[in-house]
Amino acid sequence: MVRYQRDDAVAVITLAREPVNAYDDAFHVEFQRAWQEAKHDDSRVVVMLAMGKHFCVGANLRDPRPAPAGATVLPPEEELHLISSVVKPTIAAVQGGCIGGGQRMVWPCDLVFCTDDAFFMDPTASMGIGGIQSHVHTWFYGPRLAKEMIYSGMRLPASRMYAMGQVNRLYPTVEELHDGARAFAHEIAAQDPAPLRQAKRAVDTTMDIMGRHYVLSRMAELLDPLPPMRMPGPSEDA
């Protein structure tokens, strides 16, 4: 379901559960192992691609498979930390839909490349959930757009994300997307890795000073169920 390959100094993680790359615990075991390998080997850049029509449509609700016996699945916030803790430059290449929890695979990557028709979406409010478990929407979409996305379940086109500076490059086709992501990765990999690590740490530390780490470390509290809403009675102020 998730392939890990080396292309010289570039590590390539490929989501290969076509056509839509829906995830379950079995998928996340392979996904997290791939990122662990990318974190610890001698590659210089990591590229994450997806096969099929969609990058990831979220959870596999039809026939979810458990993790293999003895395997450990990191919870969502720890998976986010795993990807963001990779000191090498990371690039996510997204085509089609990046829906629900599929977004949490992309958010911690340094750069995001998309096809022109790619979109991001979180329909979980209609399922009785106030956003996916790793609630980092506000960091990537801003507070108003994050609320609009979650309230309505609307699609957020990659072109709009590009205009906001949250998507780095747009490509007309999946082939050009994958070729472009790989080419850029090799371009970066040819550089001295030390200043790249330093630059990544500086940007990420700045984000943590602004509160990102606080949000991730208090994920469970943010998504704690709220008490039932009490409506004012006729004699009370509305």
Image (cartoon, grey):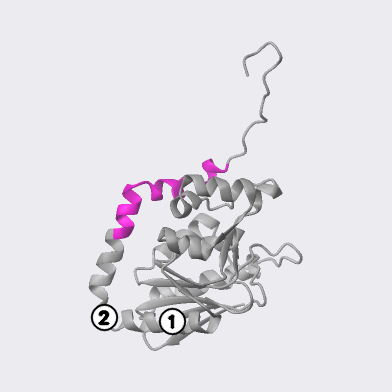
Span of residues in magenta: 203-223
Q: Amino acid at mark 2?
A: Gln
SS state under label 2: loop
Q: Residue at x 27, y 59 (%)?
A: 202
Quadrant hosting residue 54: bottom right
* Three-letter amino acid code of the residue under disc 1: Gly
Upstream in sequence: badge 1 or badge 2: 1
The quadrant in which residue 220 appears is top right
- Indicate yes or no whether the magenta region holds residue 202: no
Task: Report the residue marked by disc 2.
Answer: 191
Number of numbered tags placed on the structure image = 2
Q: Position of residue 221 (x, y in %)?
A: 52, 41
Q: Residue at x 50, y 52 (%)?
A: 137
* Foreground residue among 194 and 167: 167
The majority secondary structure of the magenta stretch comes to helix
Measured along the vertical axis of the image, is residue 92 above or below residue 124? Answer: below
Disc sitting over residue 180 in the figure: 1
Q: Is residue 148 above or below residue 189?
A: above
